Amino acid sequence: MLFLAILLFSYLQMSQQIQKTTANGKEMVTNPKLVLVQGTLNVVMKQNVTLSCLSEPASPPVRYALFKHNQQVSALNRSDLSPALFTLTISSASDVGEYKCKAEYNNSSGGKYSNSLTFTLLEPISKPVLSSPTSQAKKGQNVTLSCFSENGSLPITYLFFKGTQNISPQKMMQKREAAVIFLFINSLSDFGTYKCKANNSFPNNTKYSNGFNFTLAEERSHSQPLVIALGLILLLFIIGLALAIPFFVIPLYKSKKFKSTRPSIGLTSTVNAEESYTENEVIYSEIEPLRPEEEYINFSIIRREEEKGENLKL
């Protein structure tokens, strides 16, 4: 039983050894290791980084190729067991991203890829802006302050100050959003100058905001709401009066004026000389209108009297 186990183990080792050899007797390359030997994965513009790629064990010569996003950017041949060193200069945003290397024998159809390394470009942050929804506050009021830097690589760390004193713990923002703190205005000393600062992984890049001051809001007296209410009532009264004049007052005035200037029909004035009236006092009495037949009789009588007078003259 032990003999069979030893025989099986030997067979497995022989199979692995056969798989590692090529047709010409060389060992096949293994997956190489890509290592950063100079610089950091967080890079800035004009920064140099060096990568090492090595497949072991492998029989030289070995060809090493460096890829960025599956596109070859450089290649080196090694005739010994030393690693291939690739030096990169980060000159634009397109130079960052994922890198891999490949090890293969010359004129062979196979090859193995390494692990990947990803470079991130660090950008300097812009000057942060400190703001609040309100610029006026009074005692006993809660207020908020927000600090935001529009540009710069993440994460960004914010810190708030009042004068030169730190008033909050550091706030590290992993997203492009403002850091916010809440304050309670308890006394006049809380109306000082506030500032914030921001920084990220970019070296020597700390920026401070402009100062922000809360102003004391004026306390309103209890009589102010009453004065405002009375003012609104007076304003509504004036508006109502202005609307009533053209629709009610003026038409009523015109109607009365028309009645007073209308001529009186069927009235005649009689003056009693025996009574003591002044010259300007006039008494009006109603005269009954004549009927048509009466007008005709009166006209006939007047006509006959005129004819008699003419006969007498003859």
Image: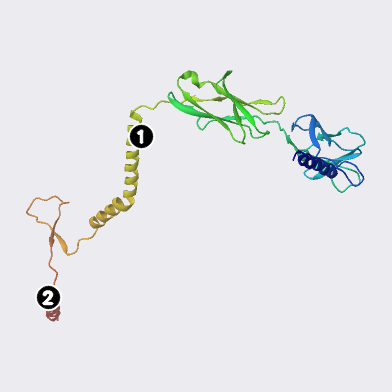
Tell me which corner region of the image, top left, top right, bottom left or bottom right, holds residue 174: top right
Q: Give x and y (percent) for residue 140.
A: 42, 24
> Circle 1: is it few (<14), some (14-19), or many (20+) Cα within 10 Å?
few
Alpha-carbon span between mark 1 and mark 2: 77 Å
Residue 203 visible from this viewpoint: yes
Position of residue 118 in the picture relative to residue 146 (left or right): right
Residue 238 position, x and y percent, is 33, 42
Question: Residue placed farthest to the left in the image?
Answer: 274
| Nearest to the observer: residue 263 or residue 143 | 143
Residue nearer the viewer, 57 or 178:
57
Task: Point out the tag, 1 or 2, that comes first from the N-terminus.
Answer: 1
- Residue drawn at the location 47% of the way across and 19% of the way down: 188
Residue at which label 2 appears: 294
Which of labels 1 and 2 is toward the front?
1
Indicate the quadrant containing the N terminus: top left, top right, bottom left or bottom right: top right
Circle 2 sits in a helix, a strand or a loop, which is it?
helix
Q: Is residue 18 above or below residue 143?
A: below
Tag 2: Cα neighbours inside 10 Å, few (<14), some, or many (≥20)? few
Q: Is residue 269 above or below residue 173?
A: below
> Which residue is painted at 33% across and 51% down in the image?
246
Q: Quadrant of the C terminus?
A: bottom left
Res 217 visible: no
What scheme was used to colour the molecule? rainbow
Give the number of the disc on residue 57.
none
Name the residue located 81 percent from the left edge and 38 percent from the top edge. Answer: 32
Question: Mark 1: which secondary structure?
Answer: helix
Q: Name the amino acid type tagged 1.
A: Ile
Amino acid identity at mark 2: Glu
The residue identified by callout 1 is 228
Judged left or right of residue 175, residue 23 is: right
Residue 232 in picture, x, y percent from top left = 35, 39
Query: 179 above or below 249?
Result: above
